[in-house]
Image (cartoon, coloured by chain):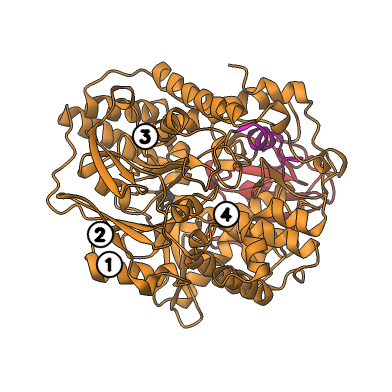
């Protein structure tokens, strides 16, 4: 990957440079975060001309390494005001890598109000007018169809939906998947940054590209085989995720009393069976038709946690129907019908809005009296209003923190203005430390302590106790920053957490691709350096340790059934980033 | 003593998902797992009354025992 492409939307000019020396060994999140830290003014307005947005494939993307097709997107976040990296599947990353493109940067901002398409192929990059029919409320499913018809069925697409055009702080970027549906770089409002630059979509056509060069193909093949075996042999990575999707977590979090319910007022629900992964699996199987219990979000995914969820007639409603979305709407907002939740999920994808932020915002809106509790039909209407946008749509699309303010609530589950996802930090203490301290704002994927706290993969820590949690959250955040830089889906973690051979194989793949000799220590150091760079950006943007705190209500509202509160002291929390 | 047993994910294949079991004093989750013919390595996570527990924990009357295979997500 030797090309570093800059698209200047002020001058409407494209420059292709050699990859700057300092970025040569970086990919994915390591690259996007270093770039943002180097080039984006920390105090800039996220929707102003001084923000820049960068797309980067991971180090292993485009190769035959299993699960390596994730793309990282970075910018200053309009939701948190801090640095953001959000990654997704789809076909974009592998195409970029095959074309030798290390990064695509969009900077500046045009003076007029016209939307553009950035077209990338082997002849170069052009900035074109966006087709009028996909602007002004057109859903993402339709927009992908229109763009695929215009530019070719096989092209990759990164897209800002109606929410991105409206520059709402929880707008996501949607990536076309192998079947023409979508996967999202969901969190932090990066779709609004794309919209602010008047870029409706990036379209990539790799026709004529050659294979990604591998320094030592034989060693790479061998390592890739060991790695694939580690994934497939593990009961979670090889079997469980494919059968039940991530939604299998509903029941286990519910049993553990850590499933946040009714805007974080309890840790357990009674209607768990309506929305569980077991039920989803049975429903898809029973309905037949277009339904698929397992599905990969990019070519080469062998874990296949995604699925196609169907209606009663067996027609596709939505894919990538994730635990966090189902929890948010089903438990936090109390919607008891999985079909209702599926239609809302589809709508959120179609509008291009983060399904975690929006679901938590909806639950807050219910507490605030803007929507009736548990009413799936009312929520669907409100979410549709985001595309218009109606005033209620704008409020909900602005995220949980804004909804909390508008409604005068104190129980507003956010850190750095980003919604807290599907695991209550009071009875599952490790994850609370990650929410509090990650530079991303509340984000479970930044250091998934659920693993050792609840799932007993990689560690065995009592979720209700503080012991070992600080070190664990730190280690998980460092490890995640490394994995996010490889282009690997984070779920490979389940296959390698308890399998040193599998982890070594991951490092061997990188080494044999690039002809280098990283050790496990180097990989840890990379993760540490990424976190330090991100934190330094946030500090320069005005964040202090006081922002690394959970909302106060967690300290004085006990969470049933365990009736525990959040009791880490500020000094203890600050220890997480003491490395 | 009466114990409520709940099974999840693959453990539900060919088994009831929820049942009451009459067990003798001193029984442990291990006894339940054996009685249900669940291969030991498949009972990866045991949660008793909302708390993670080991298979040799001595049960008490009215305990709720949830048994999961290895599961993950995120
Ligand atoms: S495991 Fe799921 S999220 Fe990961 S690459 Fe496969 S389908 Fe995508």
Rendered-image quadrant of the C terminus of chain A: top right
The one nearer the camera, B52 or A313, is A313
How far, Cα to Cα, is label 3 from label 2? 23 Å
Q: Is residue B48 left or right of residue A340?
A: right
- Which residue lies at the image location 82% right of the left edge and 46% below the top edge? A559
How far, Cα to Cα, is label 2 from label 1? 7 Å
- Which residue lies at the image location 73% right of the left edge and 48% below the top edge? A413
How far, Cα to Cα, is label 1 from label 3? 28 Å
Q: Residue A270 location in percent, x, y? A: 75, 63
- In primary-sequence order, the first of circles 1 and 4 is 1
Residue behind mark 3: A486
Residue behind mark 2: A155
State which chain is coloured red: B
Q: Residue A104 location in percent, x, y? A: 32, 42
Q: Nearer the viewer, mark 2 or mark 4?
A: 4
Q: Nearer the viewer, mark 1 or mark 3?
A: 1
State which chain is coloured orange: A
Residue behind mark 1: A148
Chain of the residue under label 4: A
């Amino acid at each position: 990957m030797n090309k570093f492409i800059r698209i200047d939307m002020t001058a409407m000019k494209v420059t292709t440079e050699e990859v700057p020396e300092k970025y040569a060994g970086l990919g994915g999140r390591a690259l996007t975060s270093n770039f943002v830290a180097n080039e984006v003014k920390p105090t800039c307005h996220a929707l102003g001309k001084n923000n820049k947005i960068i797309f980067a494939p991971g180090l292993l993307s485009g190769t035959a390494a299993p699960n390596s097709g994730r793309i990282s997107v970075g910018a200053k976040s309009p939701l948190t005001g801090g640095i953001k990296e959000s990654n997704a599947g789809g076909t974009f990353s592998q195409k970029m890598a095959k074309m030798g493109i290390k990064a695509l940067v969009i900077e500046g901002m045009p003076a007029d109000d016209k939307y553009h398409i950035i077209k990338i192929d082997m002849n170069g990059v052009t900035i074109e007018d966006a087709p009028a029919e996909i602007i002004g409320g057109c859903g993402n499913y339709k927009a992908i169809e229109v763009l695929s018809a215009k530019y070719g069925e096989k092209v990759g697409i990164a897209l800002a939906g109606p929410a991105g055009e409206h520059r709402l702080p929880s707008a996501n970027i949607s990536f076309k998947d192998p079947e023409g549906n979508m996967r999202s770089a969901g969190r932090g409002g990066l779709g609004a940054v794309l919209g602010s630059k008047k870029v409706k979509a990036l379209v990539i056509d790799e026709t004529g590209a050659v294979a990604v060069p591998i320094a030592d193909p034989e060693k790479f093949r061998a390592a890739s085989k060991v790695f694939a075996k580690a994934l497939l042999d593990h009961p979670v990575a090889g079997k469980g995720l494919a059968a039940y999707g991530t939604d299998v977590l509903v029941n286990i979090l519910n049993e553990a009393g850590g499933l946040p319910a009714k805007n974080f007022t309890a840790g357990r629900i009674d209607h768990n069976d309506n929305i569980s992964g077991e039920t989803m699996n049975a429903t898809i199987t029973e309905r037949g038709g277009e339904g698929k219990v397992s599905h990969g979000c990019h070519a080469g995914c062998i874990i296949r946690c995604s699925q196609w969820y169907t209606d009663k007639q067996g027609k596709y409603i939505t894919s990538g129907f994730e635990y966090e979305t189902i929890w948010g709407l089903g438990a936090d907002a109390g919607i008891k019908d999985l079909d209702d939740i599926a239609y809302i999920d589809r709508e959120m994808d179609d509008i291009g809005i983060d399904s975690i932020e929006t679901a938590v915002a909806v639950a807050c809106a219910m507490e605030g009296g803007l929507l009736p509790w548990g009413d799936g039909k009312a929520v669907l209407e409100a979410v549709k209003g985001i595309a218009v946008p109606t005033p209620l749509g704008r409020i909900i699309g602005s995220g949980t923190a804004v909804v909390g303010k508008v409604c005068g609530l104190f129980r507003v589950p956010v850190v750095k203005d980003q919604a807290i996802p599907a695991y209550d930090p009071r009875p599952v203490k490790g994850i609370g430390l990650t929410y509090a301290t990650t530079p991303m704002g509340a984000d479970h994927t930044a250091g998934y302590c659920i693993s050792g706290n609840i799932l007993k993969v990689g560690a065995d820590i009592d979720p209700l106790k503080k012991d070992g949690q600080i070190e664990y959250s730190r280690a998980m955040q460092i490890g995640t920053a490394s994995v996010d830089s490889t282009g690997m889906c984070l779920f490979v973690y389940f296959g390698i957490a308890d399998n040193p051979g599998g982890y070594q194989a991951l490092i061997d793949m990188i080494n044999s691709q690039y002809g280098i000799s990283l050790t496990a220590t180097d990989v840890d150091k990379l993760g540490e350096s990424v976190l330090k760079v991100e934190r330094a950006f946030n500090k320069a943007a005005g964040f202090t340790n006081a922002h690394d705190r959970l909302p106060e209500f967690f300290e004085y509202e006990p969470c049933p059934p365990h009736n525990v509160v959040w009791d880490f002291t500020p000094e203890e929390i600050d220890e997480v980033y003491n490395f | 003593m009466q114990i409520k047993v709940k099974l999840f994910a693959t453990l539900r294949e060919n088994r009831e998902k929820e049942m009451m079991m009459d067990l003798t004093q001193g029984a442990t989750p291990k006894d339940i797992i054996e009685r249900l013919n669940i291969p030991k390595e498949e009972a990866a996570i045991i949660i008793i009354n909302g708390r993670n527990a080991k298979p040799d924990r001595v049960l008490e009357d009215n305990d709720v025992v949830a048994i999961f295979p290895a599961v993950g997500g995120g």
